[in-house]
Image (cartoon, grey):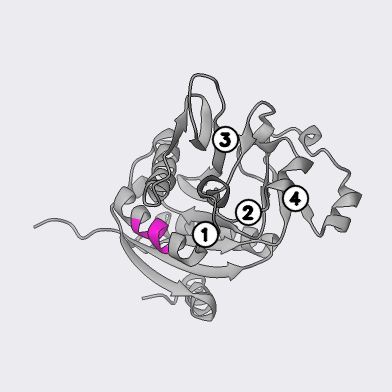
Amino acid sequence: MSEPRQKVVVCRLGNRPYAPLWDLQRALQSRLVREKRSDHPRAIPHVLLLSEHPPVYTLGKSGNRANLLIHEKDLDEQGATFFQIDRGGDITYHGPGQLVGYPILDLDRFYTDVHRYLRELEEVIIRTCASYSLEAGRVDGRTGVWVDRNHRGTERKISAMGIRCSRWVTMHGFAFNLNTELERYDAIVPCGISDRDVTSMAAELGRAIDEAAVMNTLIGHFGDVFDVEIEQVADEEADRWVETYLADEWV
């Protein structure tokens, strides 16, 4: 008899400020680490947070602050904020029209290979783009998902990625441009890469994107790529689920 598939609870959180979700990721990561270190660990669900943020720039722990091209004091005028955070990678932008995903997965229950994990996150985005007849893929040596890859080097990044692991439990994840205001990237050197551009599904397809539909498609591909059972909760129901999960009251 085959083993039951692992479960990932997808929390659809809508538009949320960056800092509280950063704190929530750390709390969820600590919850999974605490469980796996207990005397009688249980196979509790992994978690995928899906959200959108007000305009914010984040810089990874090894990133170059010089890649923020404007003064931090000028960010207020743009209605944006800035955080230096604990993921890998350089600087990126999050904002309206972008789908951000934060998988909190115990890789010990999948495979202990960070490079494979990143490639599978990329695969989720690649398959989602393909579902909209948009060809996307990888570029050697550059994490993320790109479109229009050719020998002339005109590829454009449609999804940036950066993660952090603690005892093989992940946090942070991907930022997928759907209807994103691409002008916001003028304030940074995106991901520290100065010779390539960024793009969005809307820019590539020439039309506004139904973001809820893309989210549904992405969730399906996530379940397939990671071979997991998906349970979904949204908004206030998601907040209540997270509260009981963190309090060890989840059954």
Quadrant where the C terminus is found in the figure: bottom left
Which quadrant, please, contains the N terminus?
A: bottom left
| Residue 44 image point, x, y percent | 36, 64
Question: What distance separates the C-alpha of mark 3 from that of mark 4?
Answer: 25 Å
Which one is earlier in the sequence, the residue at label 3 or at label 4? Answer: 4
Task: Give amino acid for label 3.
Answer: Arg
Q: Which residue is mark 4?
A: 83
The mark found on residue 156 in the picture is 3
Q: Where does label 1 land, which residue? A: 209
Question: Which label's residue is closer to the chain start, 1 or 3?
Answer: 3
Instruction: Say if residue 125 shows up in the picture.
Output: yes
User: Range of the magenta residues?
Assistant: 216-220
Q: Which residue is mark 2?
A: 180
Most frequent secondary structure within the magenta stretch: helix
Residue in the image at 39% along x and 47% along y? 133
N-terminal of the pair, mark 3 or mark 2, is 3
Residue type highlighted by circle 2: Thr
CA separation, marks 1 and 3? 18 Å
